[in-house]
Image (cartoon, grey):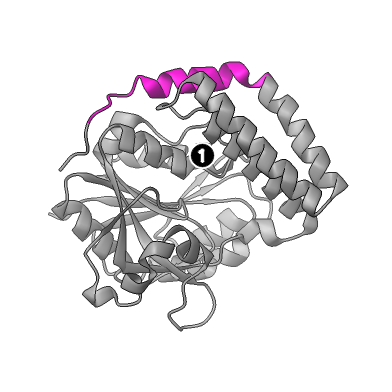
Amino acid sequence: MQPVVYVVVVNYNCQHWLGACFETLLATDYPNFKAVLVDNASTDGSAEFVRSRFPRVEVMDNDANYGFSIGNNIGTEAALAAGADYVVLLNSDTKVEPQWLSELISVGEREPGVGILGPVQLRYDGDEVEFNTWTTTAARAHLAELREPERARPWIPVEWVEGSCFAVKRRVWEEIGLLDPTYFMFYEEIDFCRRAAYCGYRTGLVPRSRIRHYRGGYWEASPKTKRRRAYHSDHSQFIYTLTEPRRSLAGNFGWYLITLGTKGKEVLSNFSLLRAWDLLRLQFVLLKEVGVLMHKWRRDRLLPRRELIT
């Protein structure tokens, strides 16, 4: 019996992406998977669209926009309760190749120490094999190998894979918990991979598993949403920096100052009053969150630290 896989797609007002996403997802060649849409109270008819066009997809309706972390946690908890052996998080602005999931699960079943797996990401538009910006930045050191997937290693150890397509074994969810709700969106998958590594699990990039990812989706709609995206990304980066469990509080504060200085230089070099205001007000938000961040740092330090599992 092949492992049971649940693929969770969290959505907020992205109906225009969902057709291509679920058309390609439901054409996946892996036989034992279930697709789930978790809708964060969209107002564009997304849930109704998926129910009518893709009846095979289970739709879960949230009563508010809970963001990426909590939205995915709601879907993940339901999948684990239903007996999932793997839960895969997938963005709505993606298209998958038929064998993408088979390749991920094949590696996962052969490698007990690999707890998190991700595919290679290609540009969304067109049929050519052209890497998108995540692959060319996060996997820069492996591009030559990724260009020849049939000759590449079955999996490549990496520090993290992007939450746009993020396959996690059941025991990893059970041992280290779900995505951290401290993050509304952005950096939650990097944080998850960090916690997994702390507990001895490896993260693997699978060269023969490929998806197309637009990167941006909802956030590219207007200058207002782009500004909100920059704010949430900055907020999450500061959370990530301030809660590294392998550093002391003083060490984390030092890295916070370095991060703040770097962002301040960026604002000055390409000055925007709105950007400067957002960065300033974010520091007051972080000050209010000190207790929450301290709790997260202490909680993550209590995870069972061990050497990498082989």
Residue at screen point 46% across, 83% down: 127
Residue 100: which quarter of the image? bottom left
Residue at screen point 22% across, 75% down: 151
Is residue 63 visible from the viewing direction of this image? Answer: no
Q: Amino acid at mark 1?
A: Ser
Residue 205: which quarter of the image? bottom left
**Element type where label 1 sits in the image:** helix
Instruction: For the N terminus, give its image quadrant.
Output: bottom left
Q: Position of residue 289 (x, y in %)?
A: 64, 22
Residue at screen point 75% across, 38% down: 279
Q: Which residue is mark 1?
A: 69
Q: Is residue 91 above or below residue 150?
A: above
Quick one: 264 or 41, which is closer to the camera? 264
Residue at screen point 64% across, 54% down: 13
Residue 94 on the magenta segment: no
Q: Position of residue 269 (x, y in %)?
A: 78, 52
Q: Position of residue 248 (x, y in %)?
A: 46, 21
Residue projecting furthest to the right: 273
Q: Main secondary structure of the magenta part?
A: helix
Residue 299 on the magenta segment: yes
What span is colored magenta in the figure? 288-306
